[in-house]
Image: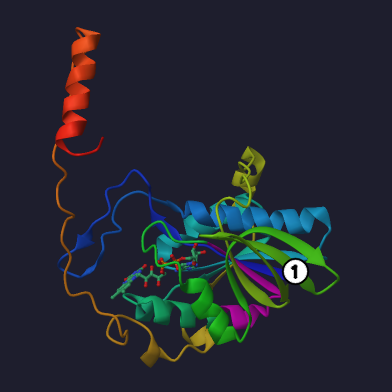
Amino acid sequence: MKICVLVKEVPDAAVQKRIDPATGRMDRSGEKNLNPYDTHAIEAAMQLKESGALPVEEIVAVSMGPESAVRALHKAVSLGADRSVHLSDAALAGSDVAATGYALAQTLKRENPDLVLLGQQSDDGECYTIGAVVADHLGMPSLTQVIKIDVEGGNTLRAERQAEYGYDTVQIPLPAVISVGDAINEPRYPSLKAIMGAKKKQLDTLSVADVSIDASKVGGDNSAAQWTGSKEPPKKAPGMIIEDEDTAQTVEQIVAWLDERKLI
Ligand SMILES: Cc1cc2nc3c(=O)[nH]c(=O)nc-3n(C[C@H](O)[C@H](O)[C@H](O)COP(=O)(O)OP(=O)(O)OC[C@H]3O[C@@H](n4cnc5c(N)ncnc54)[C@H](O)[C@@H]3O)c2cc1C
């Protein structure tokens, strides 16, 4: 069996995210990293392989992104993927969610996976939607927010989904597309040997033509969603700091502050 894990390169968590007003796209010029949510998807694939619950022969990391996304793919390989696929083409720049999902699905078709795993969200776009779009194009069932995967028989998974009201238990036949929640596992750290060896593993770089992507359906100009503007969230009023010189007086001050705002 083959598991494909979708991984994305995102701005590092420490970088202040901003839209570049000149292009209407996210400014990705700073430090970048593998989307932290995707490390849970790689770990879930590794646990399915290592436990022997599924006869997994190969884990393939797949990413769509500019040249720099290779680093995220190397990280994915250092965490356990056997090889990686990089869809990179200028024609894809500015693609919205629908176009990105279509392009990723075309790339996945070439791999013919039994299971596609994703993170619950990207740390930059935070759309939470790529899994469903990809599944639709592949004609596979889709599950989101999965925090437990058990194998039932050879070709069926029993998954637990985290929902607002509790947990859903869902049976799903393979092939399927599953976005995992970050509560599913604790991702491992890569070993030094794995980090050093990652660059030597097979990496296929593909263009839109290589995976039969219809170029009129991808890229900024062909995307239905267009950026029209953004604004900063309203600034919060500064908090009040009370120096505790006399505790009785401090308590009085806190109670008065809460009372004034009708919080008690
Ligand atoms: C008008 C517009 C223009 C845009 N222009 C650009 C652009 O120029 N460059 C750009 O990078 N983004 C661009 N985006 C954002 C891009 O469309 C989204 O980042 C992308 O569709 C995925 O959405 P998300 O990141 O919110 O994914 P989510 O749905 O939040 O991600 C869920 C999971 O999907 C997987 N995933 C998401 N994206 C990828 C990917 N690229 N490769 C592999 N796996 C992935 C990961 O496993 C991730 O954990 C643009 C969006 C809009 C609306």
The picture quadrant for ligand 1 comes to bottom left
Q: Looking at the image, which is closer to me, 251 or 1? A: 251
Could you tell whether 27 is left or right of 40 in the image? left
Residue 207 visible within the image: no
- Residue under numbered circle 1: 157
Left or right for 3, reference 38: right
Around disc 1, counting alpha carbons within 10 Å, would you say few (fewer than 14), some (14 to 19), or many (20 or more)?
Answer: many
Q: For the C terminus, give its image quadrant.
A: top left
- Residue 221, percent from left and from top: 27, 85
| Residue 118 part of the magenta-drawn span | yes
Q: Position of residue 27 (x, y in %)?
A: 26, 59
Q: Does the beta carbon at disc 1 come under 8 Å from ligand 1?
A: no
User: Given the image, on which type of amino acid does mark 1 rest?
Assistant: Leu
Q: Which residues are magenta?
A: 107-119
- 146 lies left or right of 97: right
**In the shown orientation, is residue 210 left or right of residue 184?**
left
